């Protein structure tokens, strides 16, 4: 085994050790914690967020494991052709009966930044195509802003757009039609402050979608 491989294994082993220490601390502080956690999950919240490791849903909302059902991808995109996000959304709405879907982006998002840039990044460009479309739709507004402001505004516009995509899925439309209480929230997170900010009022009915 090379020195590099040995170092990698040591780093991975540290994660296992960290887990053992964490599990023991949890058992000491709350002996019933894992027993409760192992029971059927019944979260009220479904979180669609960015894969960025600095935006952990449970931690920044102050909720314990089991309270938030989570789906994450690059730049928190909801595409009608993505069966992954649609499958998770349907499970959250139809099976878990969540009452809140939270689409959460963050300022300084690398995926959104890549969508703004005029050079190829590889296969990720196909994934970011909906955000590139947003840059064209909002071209005049974005070009009037400075670079950092432009990125931040596109991060906001992306969250608002993806929340509308969620609201227009047949999964959500069917839930509303049968009278299920379901609200879609558009939030953004500022990394350097640790603060979540709602970008608009929740979308709770089909009639709310066009008011964004």
Image (spheres, rainbow, N blue to C red):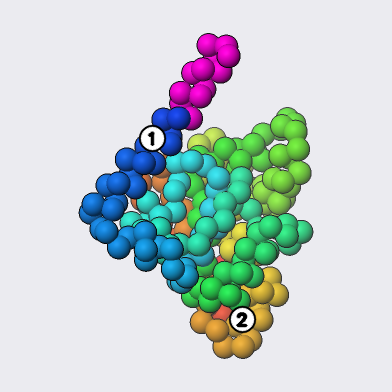
Residue that lies at the very extreme toward the top in this rendered image: 3
Res 142 seen here: no
Residue 177 visible? The answer is yes
- Residue wearing tag 1: 17
In what element is the residue under mark 2? helix
Disc on res. 175? 2
Left or right of residue 128, residue 48 in this image: left
Q: Is residue 209 above or below residue 16?
A: below
* Vertical placement of residue 45 versus 59, above or below: below
Point out the tag, 2 or 1, that comes first from the N-terminus.
Answer: 1
Region rendered in magenta = 1-12
Q: Give the residue displayed 50% in from the left and 62% down from the top.
A: 69
Relative image position of residue 174 (x, y in whole percent): 66, 81
Please give the name of the residue rendered at 37% of the width and 37% of the height, measured from the top-left corner. 18
- Residue 212 on image: x %, y %: 57, 67
Q: Position of residue 124 (x, y in %)?
A: 71, 39
Q: Is residue 99 left or right of residue 211?
A: left
Residue at x 52% of width, y 58% of height? 70
Q: How many marks?
A: 2
Viewer-proximal residue among 94 and 76: 94
């Amino acid at each position: 085994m090379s020195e590099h491989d040995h170092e990698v294994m040591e780093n991975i082993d540290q994660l296992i050790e960290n887990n053992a220490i964490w599990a023991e601390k949890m058992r000491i502080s709350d002996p019933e914690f894992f027993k409760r956690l192992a029971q059927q999950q019944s979260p009220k919240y479904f979180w669609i967020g960015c894969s960025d490791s600095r935006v952990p849903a449970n931690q920044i909302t102050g909720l314990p494991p089991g309270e938030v059902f989570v789906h994450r991808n690059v730049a928190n995109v909801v595409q009608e052709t993505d069966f992954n996000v649609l499958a998770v959304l349907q499970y959250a709405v139809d099976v878990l009966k969540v009452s809140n879907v939270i689409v959460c982006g963050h300022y300084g998002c690398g995926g959104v930044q890549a969508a703004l840039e005029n050079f190829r990044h590889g296969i990720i460009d196909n994934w970011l195509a909906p955000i590139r479309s947003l840059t064209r739709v909002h071209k005049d507004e974005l070009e009037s802003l400075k670079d950092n402001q432009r990125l931040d505004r596109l991060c906001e516009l992306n969250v608002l757009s993806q929340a509308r995509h969620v609201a227009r899925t047949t999964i959500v439309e069917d839930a509303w039609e049968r009278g299920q209480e379901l609200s879609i929230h558009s939030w953004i997170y500022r990394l350097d402050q640790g603060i979540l900010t709602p970008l608009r009022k929740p979308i709770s009915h089909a009639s709310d979608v066009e008011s964004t």
